[in-house]
Amino acid sequence: MSTTGSILIFSAPSGSGKSTIINHLLELGLPLEFSISATSRKPRGEEQDGKEYYFLTTEEFRKRIDEDKFVEYEEVYSGCYYGTLWSEVERIKNKGNVIVFDVDVVGGLNLKKIFKDDALTIFIQPPSIEELRRRLIGRGTDSMEKIEQRVAKAAIELEKSKDFDRIVVNDDLQKALKDAEEVVRGFISTEK
């Protein structure tokens, strides 16, 4: 039986290792496909349009909101939007793959409300706020002001972890990868 309709939703505070864990899972040869989110922020580092994100201007993003093109969206920071396009969900569903979402915490909980039992929500939790701050500084992609914004937001997001189906703590990357793989394989096998 096909896994069409199955949805994995990963959420975490910025710097928790969510992207590293998702990339590992996508390389395992499982019937998973990454849902590329849209954002109005500028690309960071080597990010490419249509690969990590669909990069839209704020005006383009707002136009698509008005046209009801998003499953969900959020203004994460003033003038900075993130969202999931319906066209992306349909593209992956039509291939029969499990859709993998990498979204912020509010987006993850919003998607769960929309997709209900077709979705499993997984919260990637950092070992501590201090470690999160250290990781964000180590990335070297954001100003200290932006890092402090992310850390403040993370404290709020950690409170919402209890609303997720599963929590994977990333204090040891190899263990977190193994734990996430176990959760995902279990979900896929129950969906078949």
Image: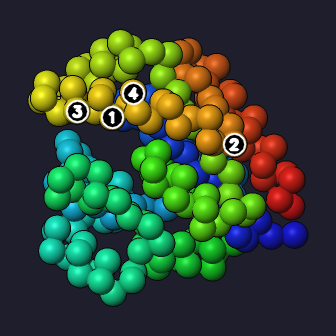
Task: Give the alpha-carbon distance from disc 1 to disc 4, as whole Å.
Answer: 5 Å
Q: Which residue is mark 4?
A: 155
- Give the residue type that dot 2 points to: Asp
Task: Give the alpha-carbon distance from disc 3 to disc 2, as whole Å.
Answer: 27 Å
User: Is 127 situated above or below 188?
Assistant: above
Q: Are marks 3 and 2 in contact (CB under 8 Å)?
A: no
Task: Give the alpha-carbon distance from disc 2 to disc 1, as whole Å.
Answer: 21 Å
Task: Give the alpha-carbon distance from disc 3 to disc 4, as whole Å.
Answer: 10 Å
For the C terminus, the image quarter is: bottom right
- Give the residue type that dot 3 points to: Gln
Side of 111 where 134 appears, left or right: left
- Image quadrant of residue 128? top left
Q: Are marks 1 and 4 in contact (CB under 8 Å)?
A: yes
Label 3 neighbour load within 10 Å: few <14, some 14-19, many 20+: few
Q: Residue at x 52, y 59 (%)?
A: 110
- Give the residue type that dot 4 points to: Ala
Task: Give the alpha-carbon distance from disc 3 to disc 1, as whole Å.
Answer: 6 Å
Residue situated in front as seen by the camera: 27 or 176: 176
Q: Which residue is mark 3?
A: 149
Task: Give the alpha-carbon distance from disc 2 to disc 4, as whole Å.
Answer: 19 Å
Side of 130 where 77 appears, left or right: left
Q: Are marks 3 and 1 in contact (CB under 8 Å)?
A: yes
